[in-house]
Image: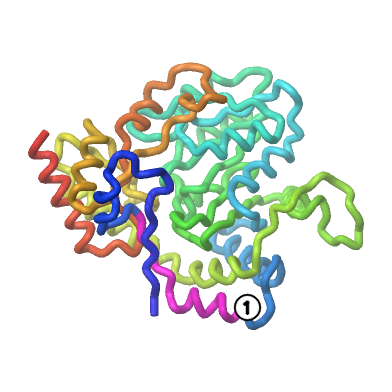
Amino acid sequence: MDIIINHFSERKLDRMADATADNIKIKWWAVTLSHDDIASVNDALLKGFLAIGPLTAAFEEAFAAALGVPHAVAMANCSSALFSSIFLLKLKPGDEVIIPARTFAATANSVILAGGKPILADSEHDKPVLSIDRFREKINFRTRAVIPCHINGGSPDMDAIMEIASAKGIKVIEDSAQSFYSKDSKGRFLGTIGFTGCFSFGITKLLTTGIGGMAVTSDSDTAMELRRLRNHGVINYSDGFHSPGFNFKFSDILASIGISRLKGIEKTVQRHIAIYRMYSDGLSSLNSIKLIPADVDSETVPLWIEAVADDRDKLISYLALRGIEAIPLLKSLEESNHLRDGSYPNAMRFSTNGVRLPSGPAQTDIDINCVIREIQNFDKTC
């Protein structure tokens, strides 16, 4: 029997009374753990595959094949994949890495912990991805890398980024935590274009193993270095310890889930796109809320349903009273105490007005239509 996993926001529901939170019927995220997924874990356990081993290697091979890249290195999470990719650059004090103001904290923290200084750049006005003009403005003699984050399946202009970076000797590390199986305008899988691409398998991702990540690269030497980094600096313990490293290893139990779920990825993708189209059709005529656009006709896979609302907090409260969980988008990085360094008006627009509506492949059409009706009713009150 399949299991539906409903995922509450990890943030405290401080906008609702406790009684209201208890009455939530439609969670912001829902995903199915199938019978095959459960059976794959059981099979791994029966064979004694617990830590990193043959199933992890098989998952890496399947993941690389799905994206058409030569090398995939499974990691404990996307953060460790990002950190390891940046660590390979051997940053020196004062070296800078340009990142978008609209991204998860892990992007900036990975730069800091790898010895670099994150430099924020504003997003585009209508999409929360790195602005090419703002990226170009931030480049100086200290710039060593750029991390174009592919937010919710959408990407900045990767051709422009690669051209600028190549001319300046800047490495491109793709933060693809939210963009597995999405493609750019040229039909390339996001995360496969730069020096490395880093993916997340968290519970709210397109391909989930509960937790975990992956780094992909086209360079065999880089892949080898990543494998050393994830395992205390060695490939085989018998060879001794010859380089720095840490414990960023994956698990065969998680890999068994990844292999199982990867087999049904096309169906999952189509469900995400279908849900986006339902919302797009249902909300297109409203004035108080607008979906953040996703070009699903060009193989963008919107991971979540995100929108900009005139009165975001009022909408969230309105839906909560009707048993529907919607959550605010995360704050932009310039609002973080350790990253404040300027004003980023486009990023702040998404921080102030952005909302995530019920999403996930296990959401039913009935529930999605219920959400749409309630938002339509809310719009009439504005």
Our reading of the magenta stretch's main secondary structure is helix
Please tell me whether mark 1 sits on a helix, a strand or a loop.
helix
Residue 72 visible (yes or no) = no
Residue found 19% across the figure and 43% down from its top: 318
Residue found 33% across the figure and 64% down from its top: 362
- The image's colour scheme reads rainbow
Q: Position of residue 63 (x, y in %)?
A: 58, 62
What's the residue type where badge 1 is placed?
Answer: Leu
Residue 172 visible (yes or no) = yes
Magenta residues, as a range?
Answer: 29-44
Is 188 contained in the magenta span?
no
- Judging by the rendered image, the residue that carries numbered circle 1 is 45
Question: For this view, does 162 lie left or right of residue 141?
Answer: left
Is 30 contained in the magenta span?
yes
Question: For this view, does 247 lie left or right of residue 11?
Answer: right
Q: In the rendered image, which quarter contains the N terminus?
A: bottom left
Instruction: Name the foreground residue: 21 vs 97.
Output: 21
Residue found 33% across the figure and 46% down from its top: 295
